[in-house]
Image (spheres, rainbow, N blue to C red):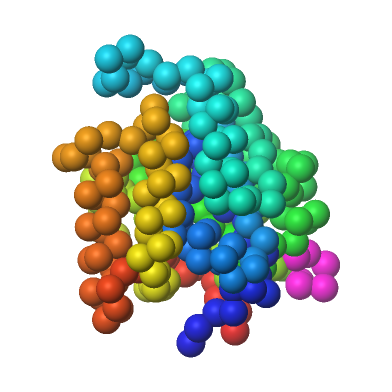
Amino acid sequence: MTIDWSRERLLVFAPHPDDETLGCGGLMTKAKKAGAEVYVQFVTVGDTADLSAKGYSTANERFSEIKKVADCFRWDDWNVAFPGDEYHLKLDTMPRFELSNTFERHSPLAITELRPTVVLAPHRTSYNQDHQVTAEAVHTALRPSDTRKRHHPRLVAAYEEAADQWRYDTAPSPNLLVELEETDLDAKLAAMRLYGTQIHEHPHTRSEPTLRSLAVLRGMQGGVALAEGFHAMRWLA
């Protein structure tokens, strides 16, 4: 079964700027190229300590990077729900209701208003607490209900990142593979380079060889050259 991406409206939830590119940069490129609408809901961004020569990146730097990446992917819109150091890397201290309600009703990209046909979010098994909380809040916001009263995206899936392989519990292999062309992967890598504070040299989970290797692995599993892997949580055919 293939998806006609030209008919789809994608809403991608990214805990932090770069997660959307790491997890589904190839799919966003493929879908946008076909004529889809693509929206990105970032959850939080703030100052971050890191292993760079400077030792940290600032929220202002991250916002500047988002704007460049948004132009690169030609997103239809994007939003940061909870900017600031009081939220960044602290989403697990927030009430779940506040997060879920924001995603469902109160964000400029709220599910009830945007009515996406495809929703992509991080996987629950990530070691990062912000990723875990985002995944759970999106899951709650998309709970089953009467489709005549609440919008139900027909495809809900969790994207994967190379860093997700560091986990306590074994996760099943992706059950949804999206074939990529070389140009799709090239666009993903180009966008990642625009996240200058986040990309690293190899060996690192956010290096270009790592991203390419994962795309090759998922492609091999589907009998094609390149792919991105997802965990389908709902697919209403």
Span colored in magenta: 146-151
Instruction: Give the camera-side residue of 97 and 205.
Output: 205
- Say which quarter of the image contains residue 7: bottom right
Instruction: Give the camera-side residue of 33 and 149.
Output: 33
Residue at the far top: name it: 54
Residue at 22% from the left image edge and 49% from the top image edge? 209
Residue at 59% from the left image edge and 71% from the top image edge? 34
147 in magenta: yes
Indicate the position of residue 65 as horizontal and vertical percent values.
51, 32
- Say which quarter of the image contains residue 81: top right
Q: Where 30 falls versus 131 (above or below)? A: below
Q: Would residue 30 appear left or right of 129 to someone viewing this image?
A: right
Q: Where 107 falls versus 181 (above or below)? A: above
Q: Is residue 81 visible?
A: yes
Residue at the far right: name it: 149
Where, quadrant-wise, is the C terminus in this rendering? bottom right
Residue at 27% from the left image edge and 56% from the top image edge? 212
Q: Would residue 86 appear left or right of 180 to someone viewing this image?
A: right
Residue at the far bottom: name it: 1
- Say which quarter of the image contains residue 84: top right
Indicate the position of residue 205 as horizontal and vertical percent values.
26, 42
Indicate the position of residue 195 as horizontal and vertical percent values.
43, 35
Q: Main secondary structure of the magenta part?
A: loop
